[in-house]
Amino acid sequence: MRLTSGRREDDFEINVIPLIDVMLTLLMFFVMTTTFVQHSSMKVTLPEASATEQAREEHALTILIDAEGRFYIDNNEVLNPGIDTLKEAILRIAGEERTRPVILRADARTQHQAVITAMDALGQLGFDRLSLATTPTKADAAK
């Protein structure tokens, strides 16, 4: 009759629980210290205009339209480019404050319809302080 267990003395196990703890700690560290890309740093080529520069208001609502016609409201992308979805997103960000100034930053290669859609949505909601962001022309920049 054999009273010892079926294991030999030279068999060993690798305990993976401390390894999992270390890996989860490293994962949390890298997630917490990683900087994520923000839409505010998205590069937009603004159209040129020969107008004077106005003072920029700090609490202005910014609507960005990229070259493909996608809308971003205060760094939040509007997923559906329709006017109703755009109006809902503007209302969600701006609330009931209709006197808030709006800066429309459209890429120079943006289709005209996307700019008109944004302006139409703002007009239907009652916003009347709209500014179009541009860059100075090369002749004005040389002065």
Image (tube, rainbow, N blue to C red):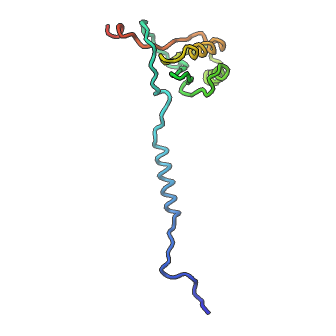
- Count of marks, rendered view: 0
Q: Position of residue 42 (x, y in %)?
A: 47, 27
Instruction: Kindly give the residue lying farthest to the bottom in the view shown.
Output: 1
Q: Position of residue 121 (x, y in %)?
A: 63, 15
- Tell me the residue at 60%/89% (across/down): 3
Q: Position of residue 123 (x, y in %)?
A: 63, 11
Can residue 95 be seen here? The reply is no
- Screen quadrant of the N terminus: bottom right
Is residue 142 left or right of 101 when viewed as pictured?
left
- Screen quadrant of the C terminus: top left
Q: Which residue is more in the foreground, 92 or 67?
A: 67
Q: Position of residue 80 (x, y in %)?
A: 63, 26
Instruction: Kindly give the residue lying farthest to the left in the view shown.
Output: 142
From this view, report whether residue 100 is shown above or below residue 2: above
- Tell me the residue at 66%/12% (across/down): 124
Can residue 61 be seen here? The reply is yes
Q: Which residue is more in the foreground, 128 or 143?
A: 143
Q: Quadrant of residue 79?
A: top right
- Tell me the residue at 51%/67% (across/down): 15
From this view, report whether residue 19 is shown above or below residue 109: below
Q: Which residue is more in the foreground, 110 or 32?
A: 110
